[in-house]
Image (cartoon, rainbow, N blue to C red):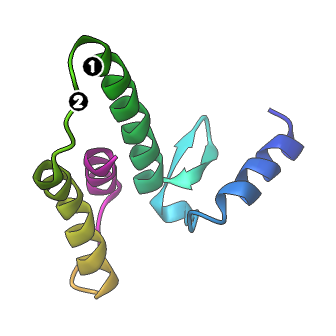
Amino acid sequence: MSNDLIDLLFFLNSFFCHQNPSRSLFIAGLQLPLCSRCTALNLGFAVGYTWIFYSVKRRRFYYNFNLTLALISPLAIDGLTQFLGFRESTNDIRILTGALAG
């Protein structure tokens, strides 16, 4: 990828993500334009929407608020306890909670 395209991706994603290098994933030595939690969250969205798209064709899809709350809660707890200084989260936990919430 050209540096201009990489710079554009980082700029556009800077509105949605802090892009802290210590909380980001790297591929071939290059930092991804989203942190590990945001990357997993977006991948979770993509997988979820794909699943919904294909499941609706076979049967009716019903939104389950309790399931949504259960899947978002780990992300909220992880983010809040880290923000309040109780502990420092790891990229593995960020990826897991982001994917669940996605």
Looking at the magenta stretch, what is its main secondary structure? helix
Residue 88 in the figure: left or right of residue 46:
left
| Residue at the spot 37% in from the left edge and 30% down from the top edge | 47
| Residue at the spot 65% in from the left edge and 56% down from the top edge | 13
Instruction: Indicate which disc, 1 or 2, sits on the residue closer to the N terminus.
Output: 1
Q: Quadrant of residue 77?
A: bottom left
User: What residue is shown with label 2?
Assistant: 61
- Residue type, numbered disc 2: Phe
| Residue at the spot 16% in from the left edge and 46% down from the top edge | 64
**Which percent across, then down, holds residue 87?**
23, 78
| Residue at the spot 11% in from the left edge and 54% down from the top edge | 66
61, 26: nearer the viewer: 61
Q: Where is 42 relative to 54, above or below?
A: below
**Which percent across, then down, holds residue 8?**
80, 50
In magenta stretch: residue 100? yes
User: What residue is shown with label 1?
Assistant: 55
**Which percent across, then down, holds residue 56?**
29, 21
Q: Secondary structure at mark 1?
A: helix
- Rendered-image quadrant of the N terminus: top right
Residue 84 in the figure: left or right of residue 35:
left
Q: Secondary structure at mark 2?
A: loop
Q: Residue lying at the far front in this picture: please name it.
A: 60
C-beta proximity under 8 Å, tags 1 and 2: yes
91, 54: nearer the viewer: 54
Region in magenta: 88-102
- Residue type, numbered disc 1: Ser
Front: mark 1 or 2? 2
